[in-house]
């Protein structure tokens, strides 16, 4: 197998290229427009045909048209929010299983391949510049506790952003030391990630009572 990580030093975003050299097929996960020239060169060098562009999540409001135009040059179908969970993406003799993991955004997906899970910004908290807090906190808790934490400790988690120079973690780290999920209850998690309510505006004071003008007898 052919596996490469592409890191953008300016914004910290990370994308991944995974290919079956024997079958001559590949997929790319969470590419950026700036990756396209390098991706095309790598595909050509390894004689790989791109089978799909896999997107763990989308920030459409922050995705300018020039980015969409650049990614269209890859000429491969996009597997994103519309992909049915429980299915798989076939790359030669390899299979990437599609998991529905909403929470970071409403329609997040994760892709599991062997002992690796490509989960985008799912557990990265404020490290995603476009979504520093989860869009759906309750759904995020369910996704992590039901889909990620039951995986073996040694499962590698490949993130969409490199935090403090690290793009890869493990389920063990997530379970024990993550600032949101490590040994936390659901209520503790929601307290940490949900902003406090806005303080109520002070009530307007009652107008001062006016004293009656004295009545002068005639």
Image (cartoon, rainbow, N blue to C red):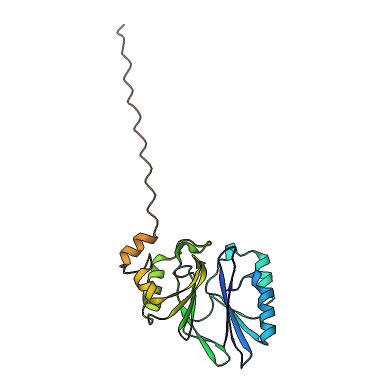
- In the rendered view, tell whether residue 113 sits above or below residue 207: below
The answer to which quarter of the image holds residue 154 is bottom left
Residue drawn where x is 65% and y is 69% of the image: 34
Residue 3 image position (x, y, % from top left): 57, 82
Q: Which of 95 and 214 is in front in this view?
A: 95
Give left or right: position of 173 versus 129. left
Residue 117 image position (x, y, % from top left): 47, 79
Question: Is there any visible trace of residue 56 in the rendered image?
Answer: yes
Residue 36 image position (x, y, % from top left): 67, 74
The answer to which quarter of the image holds residue 75 is bottom right
The N terminus: image quadrant: bottom right
Residue drawn where x is 66% and y is 65% of the image: 65
Residue 74 image position (x, y, % from top left): 67, 78
The C terminus: image quadrant: top left
Q: Which of 97 and 45 is in front in this view?
A: 45
Question: Is there any visible trace of residue 75 in the rendered image?
Answer: no
- Count of numbered marks: 0
Residue drawn where x is 40% and y is 65% of the image: 137
- In the rendered view, tell whether residue 35 sits above or below residue 192: below
Residue drawn where x is 50% and y is 62% of the image: 131
Q: Nearer the viewer, residue 56 or 1?
A: 1
* Furthest residue in direction front, as rendered: 165
- In the rendered view, tell whether residue 198 sits above or below residue 193: above
Give left or right: position of 144 versus 159. left
* Furthest residue in direction top, as rendered: 218
């Amino acid at each position: 197998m052919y596996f490469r990580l592409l890191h953008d030093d300016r914004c910290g975003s990370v994308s991944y290229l995974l290919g079956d050299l024997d079958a001559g097929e590949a997929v790319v996960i969470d590419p950026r427009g700036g990756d396209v020239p390098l991706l095309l060169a790598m595909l050509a060098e390894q004689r790989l045909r791109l089978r799909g562009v896999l997107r763990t999540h989308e920030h459409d409001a922050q995705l300018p048209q020039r980015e969409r135009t650049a990614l269209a040059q890859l000429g491969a179908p996009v597997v994103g929010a519309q992909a049915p969970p429980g299915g798989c993406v076939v790359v030669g003799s390899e299979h990437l299983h599609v998991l529905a993991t909403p929470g970071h955004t409403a329609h997040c997906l994760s892709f599991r391949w062997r002992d690796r899970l490509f989960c985008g910004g799912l557990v990265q908290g404020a490290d995603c510049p476009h979504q520093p807090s989860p869009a759906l906190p309750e759904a995020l808790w369910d996704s992590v506790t039901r889909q990620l934490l039951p995986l073996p400790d040694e499962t590698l988690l490949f993130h969409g952003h490199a935090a403090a120079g690290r793009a890869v973690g493990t389920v063990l780290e997530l379970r024990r030391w993550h600032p949101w999920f490590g040994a936390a209850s659901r209520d503790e998690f929601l307290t940490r990630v949900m902003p406090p309510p806005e303080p109520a505006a002070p009530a307007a004071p009652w107008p001062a009572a006016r004293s009656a003008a004295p009545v002068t007898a005639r």
